[in-house]
Amino acid sequence: MFGLGWPEIAIILVVAVLIFGPKKIPEIGKSLGQSLKGFKDGLSSPPEASDSVPSETEQNSHKS
């Protein structure tokens, strides 16, 4: 995992607890997980055709 060993991960976790506090860490993890899930869902589902490519009538109306 990114070339980090267990000692480095432990140090990062201790520093995170010192900076954010033990009550804030689960909230940060939850929001990070929700963000990653939303990003993954956005990548896996293609956008609707009406949102990404304007129809031929919309292109003609913009030229007039």
Image (cartoon, rainbow, N blue to C red):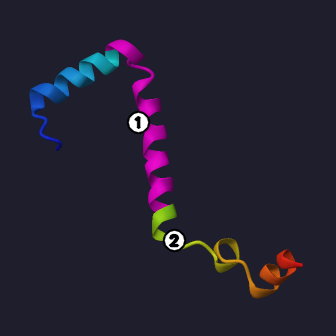
The kind of secondary structure element at disc 2 is loop
Q: Residue furthest front?
A: 64
Is 16 placed left or right of 43 in the picture?
left
Three-letter amino acid code of the residue under disc 1? Gly
From the viewer's side, name the closer residue of 52 and 31. Answer: 52
The kind of secondary structure element at disc 1 is helix
Specify few, some or many for label 1: CA neighbours under 10 Å numbering under 14, 14-19, or 20 or more. Answer: few
Would you say residue 12 sits in the magenta stretch? no
Quarter of the rendering occupied by the C terminus? bottom right
Tell me, for residue 29, which label it has, or none.
1
Residue assigned mark 2: 45
From the viewer's side, name the closer residue of 47 and 56. Answer: 56
Quadrant for residue 17, please give it: top left
From the viewer's side, name the closer residue of 17 and 48. Answer: 48
Q: Residue furthest right?
A: 64
Is 38 placed left or right of 11 in the picture?
right
Q: Which residues are magenta?
A: 18-41
- Say above or below: 43 vs 15: below
Q: Residue at x 17, y 42 (%)?
A: 2
Tell me, for residue 47, which label it has, or none.
none
Quarter of the rendering occupied by the N terminus? top left
Q: Residue at x 66, y 77 (%)?
A: 53
Instruction: Return the x and y of residue 19 as percentages of the image width and height.
Output: 37, 14
